[in-house]
Image: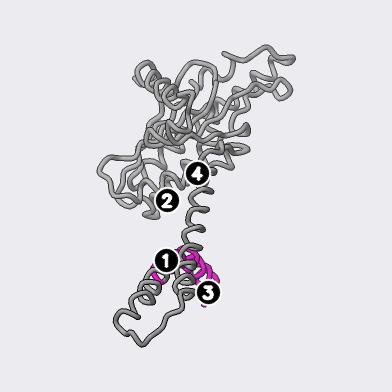
C-alpha cells in the first residue's frame, strides 16, 4: 500500500468516525432500552444505556469543537507574507470554482504594475487548463497594467540618481512589453483561457486578484528610495472572501475601481 493510500485512509477514518459513532450510540441505546419490553427475562443494567449514550455525546462534543475552531479561523484576518505565498491559494480558488458545474465563465481580474509576478501565475493557469484541471469551464482573465510608455520616466518619485532610475525603468518597460507578447501567445494556445490586457495611467497604488467578483487577494505598492523601485508583490498579501470579512467595503471599492478602468482605458 502506497503512502498516499495510507494517508487517504487515515483521513477518511478521521472524517467518518464521529457520525458512525453517533449512529451506533443511538442504535445501541435504543436496542438496550427496548429489549426488556420484548424479552422480559432479559435484564439490562441502566449503566449500559448510559454508556451507549455517552459514546454519542463524546462524538457530538468533538463535532461542536470542530465547528467552533472553524468559526474562529474565519474570524482571523487572512494574510500572507507576500504575493508569492498566496499564489497556491489563488490557483486553488480558481480550480475549486472550475470544478463546480456552472454555465457562466469564471472571470479573473488582475490589477498589476509591470506583471513580474503575474506572469508565473498566468503560466500556471495555462498549464492547468491544458492539463484539463478546469474541465470545460471557461476562464476569462483581464490584466490591468501600467502603460509601458509611462514606466520609464513618468510618475517616478524624486530620487538621488534620476538617470539611473530612468534607465532601470526603461528596462522594466521593455520587459513588460515582452511579457505581454509572451502571455498573449500562450493564451492563444490555451484550451479554455481567454486573456485581455488593459493599460492604465495612474501610478501603482495596490495590486489585486479578483476572482469571480467574490474572492479578493490584494496588497500595497510602496516606493523604495534605496532601490529606486516600486515594491508590490513582496509586500503583504491580504485575502477577503465576503462582506463578513470586509467591514470597510474594500472589496466593493476594488470592483468599482476596475470598472472605472474598463470604462476609461479599455478602448
Report the residue marked by disc 4: 71
Determine contact: label 3, label 2, CB under 8 Å: no
Question: Of residues 243 and 104, which is closer to you in this image?
Answer: 243
Report the residue marked by disc 2: 128
Report the residue marked by disc 3: 2
Task: Tell me the chief SS of the magenta region.
Answer: helix
Q: Element under label 1?
A: helix
Between the C-alphas of marks 3 and 1, the distance is 31 Å
Q: Position of residue 84 (x, y in %)?
A: 58, 41
Of the two numbered discs 4 and 3 on the same chain, state the one appearing first in sequence: 3
At x 31%, y 46%, the residue is 137
Question: Of residues 33 and 18, which is closer to you in this image?
Answer: 33
Q: Marks 3 and 2: which is nearer the front? A: 3
Q: Marks 1 and 4: which is nearer the front? A: 1
Between the C-alphas of marks 4 and 3, the distance is 35 Å
Which residue is outermost to the left?
Answer: 103
Which residue is outermost to the front?
Answer: 40
Between the C-alphas of marks 3 and 2, the distance is 25 Å
Q: Marks 4 and 3: which is nearer the front? A: 4
Q: Is residue 109 above or below residue 186?
A: above
Q: Marks 3 and 1: which is nearer the front? A: 1
- Tag shown at residue 206: none
| Magenta highlight on residue 2 | yes
Report the residue marked by disc 1: 22
Q: Which residues are magenta?
A: 1-24
Q: Position of residue 165 (x, y in %)?
A: 67, 19
Q: Position of residue 200 (x, y in %)?
A: 45, 19
Of the two numbered discs 1 and 4 on the same chain, state the one appearing first in sequence: 1
Amino acid at each position: 500500500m502506497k503512502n498516499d493510500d495510507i494517508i487517504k485512509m487515515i483521513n477518511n477514518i478521521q472524517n467518518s468516525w464521529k457520525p458512525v459513532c453517533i449512529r451506533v450510540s443511538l442504535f445501541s441505546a435504543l436496542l438496550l432500552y427496548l429489549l426488556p419490553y420484548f424479552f422480559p427475562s432479559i435484564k439490562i443494567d441502566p449503566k449500559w444505556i448510559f454508556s451507549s449514550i455517552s459514546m454519542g455525546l463524546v462524538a457530538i462534543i468533538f463535532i461542536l469543537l470542530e465547528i467552533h475552531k472553524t468559526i474562529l479561523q474565519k474570524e482571523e484576518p487572512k494574510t500572507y507574507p507576500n504575493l508569492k505565498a498566496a499564489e497556491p491559494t489563488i490557483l486553488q480558488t480558481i480550480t475549486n470554482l472550475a470544478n463546480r458545474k456552472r454555465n457562466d465563465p469564471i472571470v479573473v481580474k488582475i490589477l498589476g504594475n509591470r506583471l513580474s509576478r503575474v506572469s508565473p501565475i498566468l503560466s500556471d493557469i495555462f498549464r492547468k487548463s491544458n492539463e484539463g484541471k478546469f474541465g470545460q469551464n471557461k476562464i476569462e482573465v483581464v490584466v490591468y497594467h501600467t502603460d509601458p510608455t509611462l514606466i520609464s520616466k513618468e510618475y517616478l518619485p524624486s530620487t538621488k540618481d534620476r538617470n539611473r532610475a530612468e534607465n532601470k525603468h526603461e528596462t522594466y518597460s521593455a520587459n513588460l512589453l515582452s511579457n505581454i507578447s509572451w502571455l498573449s501567445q500562450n493564451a492563444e494556445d490555451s484550451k479554455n483561457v481567454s486573456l485581455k490586457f488593459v493599460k492604465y495611467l495612474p501610478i501603482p497604488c495596490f495590486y489585486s486578484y479578483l476572482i469571480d467578483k467574490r474572492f479578493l487577494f490584494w496588497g500595497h505598492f510602496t516606493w523604495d528610495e534605496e532601490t529606486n523601485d516600486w515594491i508590490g508583490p513582496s509586500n503583504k498579501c491580504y485575502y477577503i472572501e465576503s462582506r463578513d470579512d470586509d467591514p470597510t467595503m474594500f472589496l466593493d471599492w476594488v470592483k468599482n475601481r476596475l470598472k472605472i478602468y474598463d470604462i476609461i482605458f479599455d478602448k
